[in-house]
Every structure is written in structure tokens, then in C-alpha cells.
């Protein structure tokens, strides 16, 4: 089963401290949503409010259109899967997976049938009679997922479920989790502080900081068109180039920066309409720099820079560039293999204007 989730102006305070600050979110049925942000930003607090383990100080929650704000966890159509997924060590896998069903009074035969179906879903059908200690970490994690899904929640809440796994297994489990979610169609809300994980699994990502939502959208949109400096910086590497808007006409705004004047279409201003005099920061991803002259007509030249360092990364060279106009500034640029850049070399750098995002500096 699956359901929509609606969060209206949810605030949670602990004494004088505001852990969640006026959060609004509309989640579609069957979406894989990732709550992403640094430690302490309020991800778990929001998940706990959805699961019914915390009641918001203000605001309301609805699941499948039904008011849930004060409904206890057991009466909600949600299941929460925690990082320490605590399987019962003395029980066979089929009994672990069937546990929730037993609590709901489902008979043994039906329980076993359903447990086996869900063990099959996670690729462990032939292990139904094993006990948790006979499994690897990744396999135990899959059993926990089967157990959570066996009770047929409308919404599965996952609190850093892959946090205990090593990197390789983590990446593999991300792919599996995404594939299983697509198969069952349940709404998944998954907490992580790992940006790559969020991009690997999320249909949409909620970027959180200090109890607030900084950005919400599909991974590509948050990466390419972030709506806050925090979201831009949290979703991968970015160069921040501070400047001021000196002029605006009907289609473009001129931003004066230490790399020179840049004329940007208004679509580059993702957080609102630009106005003259506004302190503005340009966000440029390392892979968007290129050597001037290599590209098309939409390229903005940013002047000459010296390659301070260059490291070969297989797919590209990762370079630190010192611009001639501001040598104390270090720019990180990924240059293609074909650019064959060398330390000490002077290069003319350019960026496709459409790849630049301009955001108000005061958000920093
Ligand atoms: N019961 C509580 N009493 C007081 N403060 C709390 C309580 N629960 C959470 N907090 C505070 O609220 C803030 C948000 O906590 P939360 O657990 O939601 O963060 P998080 O984003 O999930 O972080 P992490 O990734 O480290 O788990 C933190 O500063 C935390 O110390």
C-alpha cells in the first residue's frame, strides 16, 4: 500500500531550542523521499513526528489525507526502520519477518507465506530457516527491510538504515533499496547525511539545515539549480564567487565579481528576481569550467588563471586555479583529460552562462 504525506507548518521545540522550524512538505504516494542534511539539522526529529514518536509543538501531519498529528505510532499506517535494525537473534529469519504480523494476530500459515514472499523480495528466500548470526551485515539489513514491509505500511520511514554498512555494501544496498521501493510502490521517507546516497536513491530530496527546509526537488534540480547557498554547497563541490548586481534589464542582470563582469540571464537567479545593488554569489560547479575558446557562443570568459595544482582523477584533471584578477582566490576546476593542463600553465577560463546559479549572498 502507499499514501500521500502532508506536513503543514511543523515546529518542534525542546525547551528554548527549536529543532524543527515551520516545515511544510507535500509528498506524493509512492515517492522515494530523502531527508538530507548535516548532523543536528532536524532530520530524525521530522521522521519521529511522522512515525508518531514525537508530537509537533505546532503544525499538523496528515497521511493519506487522514489527520495523524496526535495518533500514536501503532495506530499509524507507518513503519520505522532504524539504523540498529535489531533482529531477534534466537528467531529464524521467517519468524523475524513474520513478527509484526504475529503481533497483528495473523495466523501461522499466512504469516509464513507472507514472510517467505518478502524474503524472496529481498533475495533471501532460501535462507528462511537461518538465524541472523548466519548472515552478513547487508543480508541482515535486507531481513530488516523485509520485516518492515511485511506488515504492509503505507509509508516506510527509514532512519539512516545503511549507516552501519561499509561503503561498497552501502552503494550496493542503495541500488537494491531503490529497486525494491519501485517494486512495492510504498512511500519511502529515508534519512541520510550522505549526499551521494540521496542522489542515488531519492525521487526528490529535502535539503535541511538548522530545522528548516533549504531546498526540495529532484536530485538533478537541486544539483544544477539549487535555491540556497547551503543546498548548493551540501550537494557536492561548488565554487562560490561573491559579487554585486550592477545593472538589470528585462532579460539579464550584470554581476560584478573579482573574476570580472558576468552577464546572466534572469533564469540563473534561482531564488528570486535580481535587483541592482544586491550582494550576489555565483555558484559554479568545478566541472563547468573549461578553457576559453573550446566551447560554444554562450560561454562567458572569466579571464586568465594560473594552474596552481593539477591532479589526474581518471575521468578528469582536478585543478586549483589562481585567477589573474584575484590570485589569492583558489578556484577548483575539473578539466577534461584532453585539456592536458600542467602546473604553472596559464589558461583562459570560461563557463557556460547557463550553468551558473546566482543566489543572494546574505543566505550564506
Ligand atoms: N529529546 C531532545 N531533547 C533536546 N534536544 C533534542 C532532542 N532531540 C533532538 N534534539 C536536538 O534537536 C536537534 C535536531 O536533532 P535531530 O536528531 O533531529 O538531528 P539529525 O539531523 O537527525 O542529526 P543526526 O544526523 O546527527 O541524527 C539536535 O540539535 C538535537 O540535539
Image (cartoon, rainbow, N blue to C red):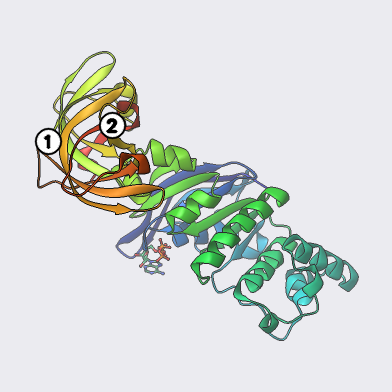
Q: In x, y percent, where is residue 134?
A: 69, 82
Q: Is residue 129 left or right of residue 19?
A: right
Q: Which mark is residue 351?
A: 2
Seen as rendered, the residue at the extreme right is: 109
For residue 177, which quarter of the picture? Answer: bottom right
List the residue tagged with mark 1.
Answer: 258
Helix, strand or loop at label 2? It is strand
State whether residue 304 is above or below residue 81: above
What residue lies at 49% left-to-right and 49% top-to-bottom? Answer: 199
Element type at mark 1 = loop
Mark number for residue 326?
Answer: none
Q: Position of residue 37 (x, y in %)?
A: 39, 55
Residue 123 drawn at (x, y percent): 74, 64
> Is residue 55 something one can see in this rendering?
no
Q: Considering only order in the chain, which callout, 1 or 2, is on the residue closer to the N terminus?
A: 1
**Rendered view: 359 above or below 249:** below
Q: Nearer the viewer, residue 233 or 168?
A: 168
In the rendered image, the residue lying farthest to the bottom is 90
User: Along the horizontal axis of the image, is 15 left or right of 303?
Assistant: right
Q: Is mark 1 within 8 Å of ligand 1?
A: no
**Within 10 angstroms of label 1, few (less than 14), some, or many (20 or more) residues?**
some
Amino acid at each position: 500500500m502507499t499514501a500521500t504525506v502532508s506536513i503543514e507548518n511543523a515546529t518542534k521545540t525542546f525547551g528554548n531550542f527549536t529543532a524543527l522550524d515551520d516545515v511544510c512538505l507535500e509528498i506524493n504516494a509512492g515517492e522515494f523521499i530523502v531527508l538530507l542534511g548535516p548532523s543536528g539539522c532536524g532530520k530524525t526529529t521530522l521522521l519521529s513526528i511522522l512515525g508518531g514518536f514525537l508530537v509537533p509543538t505546532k503544525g499538523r501531519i496528515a497521511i493519506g489525507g487522514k489527520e495523524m498529528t496526535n495518533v500514536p505510532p501503532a495506530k499509524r499506517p507507518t513503519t520505522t526502520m532504524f539504523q540498529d535494525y535489531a533482529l531477534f537473534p534466537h528467531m529464524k529469519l521467517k519468524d523475524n519477518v513474520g513478527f509484526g504480523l504475529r503481533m497483528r494476530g495473523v495466523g501461522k500459515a499466512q504469516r509464513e507465506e507472507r514472510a517467505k514472499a518478502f524474503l524472496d523480495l529481498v533475495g533471501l528466500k532460501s535462507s528462511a530457516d537461518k538465524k541472523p548470526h548466519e548472515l552478513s551485515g547487508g543480508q541482515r539489513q535486507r531481513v530488516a527491510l523485509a520485516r518492515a514491509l511485511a506488515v504492509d505500511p503505507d509509508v516506510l520511514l527509514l532512519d539512516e538504515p545503511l549507516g552501519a554498512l561499509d561503503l561498497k555494501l552501502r552503494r550496493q544496498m542503495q541500488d537494491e533499496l531503490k529497486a525494491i521501493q519501485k517494486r512495492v510502490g510504498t512511500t519511502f521517507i529515508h534519512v541520510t547525511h550522505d549526499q551521494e546516497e540521496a542522489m542515488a536513491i531519492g525521487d526528490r530530496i529535502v535539503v535541511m539545515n538548522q530545522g528548516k527546509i533549504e531546498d526540495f526537488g529532484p536530485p538533478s534540480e537541486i544539483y544544477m539549480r539549487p535555491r540556497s547557498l547551503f543546498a548548493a554547497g551540501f550537494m557536492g563541490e561548488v565554487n562560490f564567487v561573491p559579487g554585486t548586481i550592477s545593472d538589470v534589464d528585462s532579460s539579464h542582470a550584470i554581476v560584478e565579481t573579482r573574476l570580472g563582469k558576468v552577464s546572466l540571464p534572469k533564469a540563473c537567479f534561482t531564488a528570486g528576481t535580481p535587483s541592482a545593488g544586491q550582494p550576489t554569489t555565483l555558484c559554479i560547479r568545478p566541472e563547468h569550467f573549461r578553457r576559453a575558446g573550446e566551447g560554444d557562443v554562450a560561454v562567458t570568459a572569466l579571464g586568465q588563471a594560473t594552474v596552481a595544482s593539477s591532479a589526474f582523477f581518471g575521468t578528469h584533471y582536478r585543478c586549483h586555479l589562481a585567477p589573474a584578477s584575484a590570485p589569492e582566490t583558489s578556484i577548483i576546476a575539473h578539466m577534461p583529460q584532453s585539456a592536458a593542463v600542467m602546473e604553472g600553465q596559464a589558461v583562459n577560463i570560461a563557463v557556460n552562462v547557463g550553468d551558473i546559479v546566482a543566489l543572494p549572498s546574505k543566505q550564506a
